[in-house]
Image: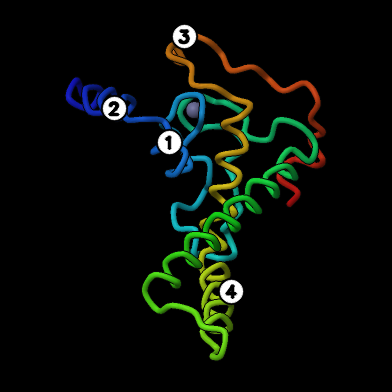
């Protein structure tokens, strides 16, 4: 039991971006945001826990909260495209008189589609991290209940 606590405490000291990538609750960095750990179970990819299973932080902060994650997702896609373009340029190269640029376009498109389940989750995880900070004493405080929710619209994505 005590050993478990030690392990948990060690885990919380990892840098928070690791937790963001793992789609952990931004407040306690322990609970999972998503109901299914595997984003490639496509029917359940976006199924979120209503509250953090560890600290009870609500994950839907207001009506339409995750619309904003679209901007994050867009930024991530652009970043991946730039990275893959640079990688393509350095390894395969590009020329004016052949189709290597077109091949990159297709390959990058396939890559983005294949990564979509991960990117959509990551975008939500990054988005909520803008609004909910890590609370060192999450065991002591209760999480802030959002004021502008409409129960009929919770998780209606
Ligand atoms: Zn939590």
The tag earlier along the polypeptide, 3 or 1, is 1
Q: Report the side of 6 relative to 35 (left or right).
A: left
Circle 1 or circle 2, nearest the eye: 1
Task: Farthest residue to the bottom: give it.
Answer: 98
Q: Report the side of 90 relative to 125 (left or right).
A: left
| Residue that label 4 marks | 109
The tag earlier along the polypeptide, 4 or 2, is 2
Q: Report the side of 141 relative to 91 (left or right).
A: right
Residue in the image at 53% along x and 46% along y: 34
The tag earlier along the polypeptide, 3 or 4, is 4
Tell me the quarter of the picture where residue 57 sits.
Answer: top right
The tag earlier along the polypeptide, 1 or 2, is 2
Numbered badge on residue 8: 2
Marks 4 and 1 sit apart, C-alpha to C-alpha, by 26 Å
Circle 3 or circle 4, nearest the eye: 4
Nearest the viewer among 82 and 65 is 82
Q: Which secondary structure, mark 4?
A: helix
| Residue that label 3 marks | 140
Above or below: residue 82 compared with residue 143: below
Residue 68 lies, in percent from the top left, at 72, 42
């Amino acid at each position: 039991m005590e050993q478990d606590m030690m392990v948990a405490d060690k885990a919380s000291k990892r840098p928070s971006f690791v937790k963001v990538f793992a789609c952990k609750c931004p407040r306690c960095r322990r609970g999972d945001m998503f109901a299914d750990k595997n984003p490639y179970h496509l029917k359940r990819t976006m199924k979120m826990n209503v509250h953090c299973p560890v600290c009870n932080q609500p994950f839907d902060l207001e009506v339409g909260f995750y619309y904003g994650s679209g901007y994050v997702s867009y930024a991530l896609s652009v970043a991946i495209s730039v990275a893959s373009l640079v990688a393509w340029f350095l390894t395969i190269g590009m020329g004016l008189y052949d189709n290597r640029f077109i091949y990159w376009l297709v390959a990058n498109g396939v890559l983005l589609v294949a990564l979509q389940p991960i990117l959509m989750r990551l975008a939500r995880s990054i988005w909520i991290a803008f609004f909910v900070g890590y609370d060192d004493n999450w065991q002591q405080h209760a999480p802030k209940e959002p004021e502008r929710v409409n129960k009929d619209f919770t998780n209606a994505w």
